[in-house]
Amino acid sequence: MDRFIYKITSKNQWTSTEASGCFEGAGIDRSDGFIHFSSAAQLIETVSKHFVGKRELLIICVDADKLGEHLRWEPSRGGDLFPHLYGVLPLSAVVETLELPWDETGGHVFPMGPWQ
């Protein structure tokens, strides 16, 4: 499986995460019982399905190797395996945070990265 996985979150939620020292997930994560992530190949589709019209977003890049046995790759959309974290995300596993800007045409502009 991929070494790096990605989480989309709002800037506000991430600011709270940095203050607390770990990420417990967004509302849907807590409802589902795990934190949803995407591989690089899945990231753009995830944003287009779940974050249309949302602004002030960040891409959180995570080193999957640092999550241990709490990370599982499980089938989801169309049978694709998606990374799911059964536990909190420690900030020590976060490699980078990138802004996901909004452009004048009403869409997200992805920074250069492995999702291209």
Image (cartoon, helix red, strand yellow):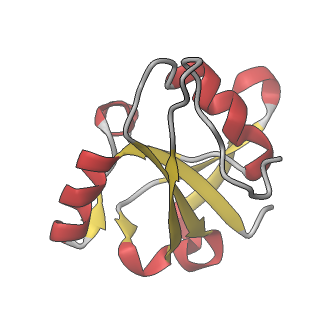
The image shows residue 1 at horizontal and vertical percentages of: 80, 61
The image shows residue 91 at horizontal and vertical percentages of: 37, 74
Q: Image quadrant of residue 103?
A: top right
The image shows residue 44 at horizontal and vertical percentages of: 70, 35
Q: Residue at x 80, y 57 (%)?
A: 114
Q: Residue at x 73, y 70 (%)?
A: 3
The image shows residue 93 at horizontal and vertical percentages of: 49, 76
Can the viewer see residue 85 in this picture? yes
18 to 77, vertically: above or below: below
104 to 80, vertically: above or below: above
Q: Residue at x 37, y 72 (%)?
A: 90
Q: Nearer the viewer, residue 110 or 34?
A: 110
Q: Nearer the viewer, residue 1 or 105?
A: 105
81 to 105, vertically: above or below: below
Q: Does residue 73 appear to the left or right of 37 in the view shown?
A: right
Q: Nearer the viewer, residue 16 or 85?
A: 16
Q: Nearer the viewer, residue 48 or 109?
A: 109
27 to 67, vertically: above or below: above
